[in-house]
Amino acid sequence: MPATQRIELVSERDTMTIDTRHGPIRFLADTGILRMRAETLLTKEPDTITWLDSFDPGEVFWDIGANVGVYSLYAARTGKPSKILAFEPSPWNFATLVRSAELNGWNDRISPYCVAISDQTKLDTLHMKNAFFGSAQCSFGEPVNQWGGRLDVALEQAAIGFSIDAFIVTFDPPFPNRIKIDVDGLDGAVARGMARTVRDERVRSVLIEIDQARTGELDEVTRIMGEGGLELRNPPPAGGWIESNNFCFTRPGF
């Protein structure tokens, strides 16, 4: 059976379509958690959706810690980014991301890479709290969770990691104008590994998720982004942090 027909059979049986203001998106959703990922696309992180909607046409979007790619898929559906690079080291999430991109016919828009992003370029271990499609809380190198404690590891796998700075120097990929970072506890490491990149004025904004248990990490990230000319546009609310916070660093004028 041709591969395209095989994909269609899977899509009829195991996919979900979510309507957005830009049009429908099809998701591989053959497990409960994958259905949840699809169903909460517009409600789980409305600030991320608003940020993606703010992009200018032709920009390049990097999705770091893409999981199963719901925000890469949404960005593609907006029609604004000229290219989307999605980085996800979990083999299950990566496979789901690739299949969902194919179901929508967006292989030319989304380039998925099964690599970890951190502050170093190295071979190391990917520690995974759960070994199933759509799971979160993976840690590259050290088995730490999003709160800074030790990760309860269900599976470990060899993986390759890059800093953003090294990835750009090594491969000369489409240069990012917008970067989303959601890596469950290694956000500071990712920021350290992109210190040179954010000094480039082509980087217009960075959205990074930091947990309330790691408030000290925000100071480090703010310093790195500030040295690159990016300003924190949404400091922690006066009433205190929520469990996880998306902080947006933006270059003046964007």
Image (tube, rainbow, N blue to C red):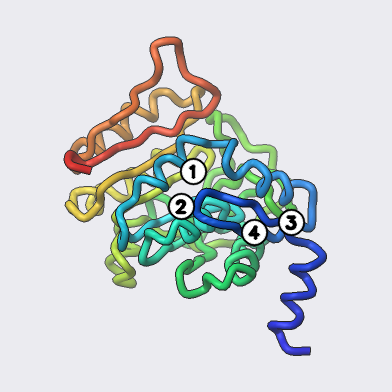
Which residue sits at x=61%, y=55%? 68
Q: Amino acid at mark 2?
A: Ile
Kind of element beneath mark 4: strand
Side of 222 relative to 158 (left or right): left
Classify mark 3: residues with Cα within 10 Å, few (<14), some (14-19) or many (20+).
Answer: many
Give the residue number, with chain letter if any, for mark 2: 64
Label 2, label 1: how far apart the Cα atoms are: 6 Å
Which residue sits at x=38%, y=41%? 207
Kind of element beneath mark 1: loop
* Circle nearer the N terminus (1, 3): 3
Give x and y (percent) for residue 169: 27, 67
Label 2, label 3: how far apart the Cα atoms are: 21 Å
Kind of element beneath mark 2: strand
* Circle nearer the N terminus (4, 2): 2
* Circle nearer the N terminus (3, 4): 3
Residue 210 seen in render: yes
Label 4, label 2: how far apart the Cα atoms are: 19 Å
Give x and y (percent) for residue 71: 52, 51
Task: Please give the label number shown on residue 29.
Answer: 3
Q: Which image quadrant for residue 150?
A: top right
Give the residue number, with chain letter if any, for mark 4: 157
Label 1, label 4: how far apart the Cα atoms are: 20 Å
Give the residue number, with chain letter if any, for mark 1: 182
Q: Amino acid at mark 3?
A: Ala
- Closer mark to the observer between disc 1 and disc 4: 1
Q: Is there CB contact under 8 Å for labels 2 and 1?
A: yes
Which residue is the extreme one toward the bottom?
Answer: 1
Give x and y (percent) for residue 29: 74, 56
Q: Is there CB contact under 8 Å for labels 1 and 3?
A: no
Give the tally of numbered discs: 4
Looking at the image, which is closer to me, 63 or 118?
Answer: 63
Which residue sits at x=74%, y=68%? 11
